Amino acid sequence: MLRECPIHVSDASNLKTTRQPRSFRYIAALLLLWAGVIAWGVLPIPMAAAAPHAAVPETAFDFGKITEDRPLTHTFVIENTGTAPLHIEDVDPDCACTVPKYDKSIPPGSQGGITLTIKPFSVIHQFKKETKVRLNDPDQPRLVLTMTGVATPFIEIQPSHIVRLRGSPGDNIRGQVRFISHIPTPLKITEYRTNIPDKIEVTLKPEVPDKVYVLEVRPKGQVSGPFAGVIELFTNSKERPRLIVRVFGEIYLPSTGGQ
């Protein structure tokens, strides 16, 4: 027969004491893990520092073909898509002919603008005006705004507003000036006069009615020597009510070849 192996009380107590620490450690580990998860959920997450951000849909504007000597204005829109106020710290045009007006502070989620006006005297020929802008945007601290265009005169003078008459009396000396209107309404040259009527002869003829006129200038008779003067022309245009042509003459008698 098999004999039972007796278990002593001291052995049983040893088994009990060796198993308890393992279960306690396991439960303690779980409790610490859950405590960490809970603590992580309630602790505040660090937020990014508030900062402005400038969103600019356009930094260049072309006026296209326009008439000269008139004020031109354009507004560049700036949106603050950041989380702090956007400050326009400085607006610096490349010349005094451009006048700026702008919003100095733009709140988050709002729009502002920089309005630039070019003075009339600077709206001539093909032009390009640049303006530097300084912002407190950490990612875009500087902008350059550009305005361009081609300005044609209200009344174009070809080839020039200066006529030079050179030669000897009897030569076919003459100068021509063509006035071409870019005004939408009919152009009338109502009157013309000169301060040297004893030196030159002036004729004015329409080449294209109400649009193009040709002014012809000749030295008068047997006039000789140097002279200078102006021809004033008066129009029905409020944009160009007065036109001026300058005349310079150098008319000399031919040399006889003797002493």
Image: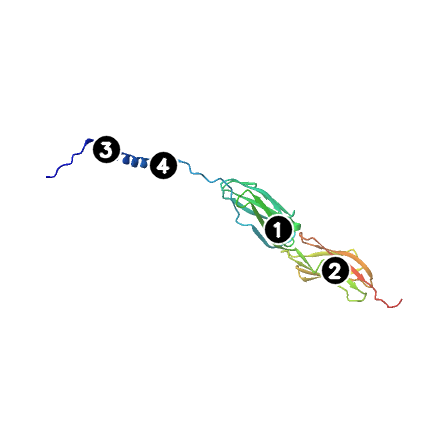
Disc 2 marks which amino acid? Val
Residue annotated with mark 2: 163
Q: Nearer the viewer, residue 136 or 230?
A: 136
Disc 3 marks which amino acid? Asn
Residue 200 tag number: none
Counting from the top left corner in percent of width and height, residue 48 is at 47, 40
- CA distance for labels 4 and 3: 34 Å
Give yes or no for contact between labels 3 and 1 (Cβ–Cβ under 8 Å). Answer: no
Please indicate whether residue 64 sits to the left or right of residue 229 in the image. left
Q: Residues within 10 Å of mark 4 (few under 14, many from 20)?
A: few
- CA distance for labels 4 and 2: 95 Å
Disc 1 marks which amino acid? Lys
Q: Nearer the viewer, residue 239 or 163?
A: 163
- CA distance for labels 4 and 1: 62 Å
- CA distance for labels 1 and 2: 33 Å
State the residue at coordinates (62%, 51%). 129
> SS at mark 4?
helix
Q: Residues within 10 Å of mark 1 (few under 14, many from 20)?
A: some
Residue 36 tag number: 4
State which quadrant residue 201 falls in.
bottom right
Query: What residue occupies the far left of the structure in this picture?
Result: 1
Residue annotated with mark 3: 14
Of callouts 4 and 2, which one flags the residue occurring earlier in the amino acid sequence? 4
> SS at mark 3?
helix
Counting from the top left corner in percent of width and height, residue 23 is at 27, 36
Tell me the quarter of the image containing the C terminus: bottom right
Residue annotated with mark 1: 129
> SS at mark 2?
strand
Q: Is residue 198 visible?
A: no
Eye-nearest disc, 4 or 2:
4
